[in-house]
Image (tube, rainbow, N blue to C red):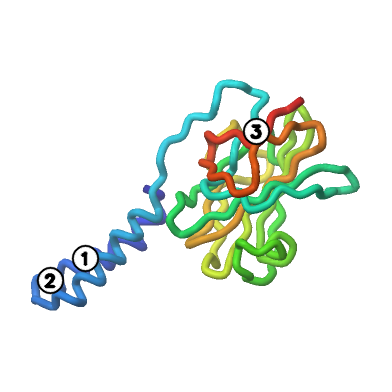
């Protein structure tokens, strides 16, 4: 479990046990449910990326909700969007190996993360990672429920594929922008797992 999860899970679990001891069963049941849900939400399973170094893995668990042509900094490319429900693992991972050259936080709206406008208008945090094949940008996007973006890395850090970089609490979205010199291997509607599912491959 993610370390931050203990402070969300421990209080309702402890209060729930106390409530049960005093026979406040309904209250105790609700508190225990909330505590167990926090344990479930903050789970952090180990992941092993595929051995092919030319593959680009998903930065998050969830469902692919969009694959669109999109320019970035005047360069043509594609944006892949992954929606995370409250039932998905919310630890975010680096889709590529490289060095973080910039981390850009931007305030914004809190539209439902499934909506296309969330990519442009919601509160978000973007990682710019320089790889041997060029720059890759991936973005944590807060949703209607998720109001807290957590970052565990800093500018200048080196990353390996599948490495944990942060999380978004309680439902969210992640986008990844790739240059045109990749072959996209996923389709809209496909379920993916962070750090293991292959989104694309360098040509």
Q: Residues within 10 Å of mark 1 (few under 14, many from 20)?
A: some
Disc 3: which residue: 56
The structure residue drawn at horizontal position 48% and vertical position 30%, both measured from the top left corner, is 48
Residue 122: horizontal and vertical position, in percent? 67, 66
In this picture, residue 52 sits left or right of residue 40: right
- x and y, in percent, of residue 120 in the image: 74, 62
Report which quarter residue 96 is drawn in. top right
Placement of 44 over or under 130, stated as above or below: below
Secondary structure category for the residue under label 2: helix
The disc, 1 or 2, on the residue closer to the chain's N-terminal end is: 1
| Residue 73 in the image: above or below residue 57 | below
Q: Relative to residue 89, is residue 77 drawn left or right?
A: right
| Label 3: which secondary element | strand
Q: Earlier in the sequence, mark 3 or mark 2?
A: 2
Crowding at label 3, few (<14), some or many (≥20) Cα neighbours within 10 Å? Answer: many
Within the image, what quadrant is residue 15 found in? bottom left
| Labels in figure, total | 3
Q: Are marks 1 and 3 in contact (CB under 8 Å)?
A: no
Disc number placed over residue 14 in the picture, else none: 1
Q: Position of residue 44 (x, y in %)?
A: 41, 45
On the rendered structure, is 60 left or right of 89?
A: right
Residue that appears at 60% across and 68% down: 112
Q: Which mark is residue 20?
A: 2
For label 2, count other residues whose C-alpha is less than 10 Å away and answer few (under 14), some (14-19) or many (20+): some
Residue 43 showing in the rendered view: yes
Residue furthest right in the image: 74
């Amino acid at each position: 479990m993610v370390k931050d999860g203990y402070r969300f899970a421990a209080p309702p679990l402890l209060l729930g046990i106390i409530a049960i001891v005093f026979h406040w069963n309904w209250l105790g049941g609700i508190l225990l449910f909330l505590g167990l849900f926090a344990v479930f939400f903050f789970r952090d399973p180990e992941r092993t990326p595929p051995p092919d170094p030319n593959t680009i893995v998903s930065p998050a668990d969830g469902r692919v909700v969009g694959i669109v042509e999109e320019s970035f900094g005047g360069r043509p490319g594609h944006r892949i969007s992954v929606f995370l429900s409250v039932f998905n693992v919310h630890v975010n991972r680096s889709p590529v190996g490289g060095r973080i050259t910039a981390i850009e936080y931007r305030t914004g709206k809190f539209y439902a993360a499934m909506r296309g406008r969330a990519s442009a208008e919601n509160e978000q945090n973007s990682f710019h990672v320089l790889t041997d094949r060029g720059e890759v940008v991936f973005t944590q996007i807060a949703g209607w429920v998720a109001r807290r973006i957590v970052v565990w890395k800093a500018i200048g850090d080196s990353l390996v594929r599948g490495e944990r970089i942060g999380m978004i609490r309680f439902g969210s979205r992640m986008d990844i922008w790739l240059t045109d010199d990749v072959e996209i291997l996923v389709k809209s509607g496909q379920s993916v797992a962070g750090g293991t599912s292959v989104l694309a491959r360098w040509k």
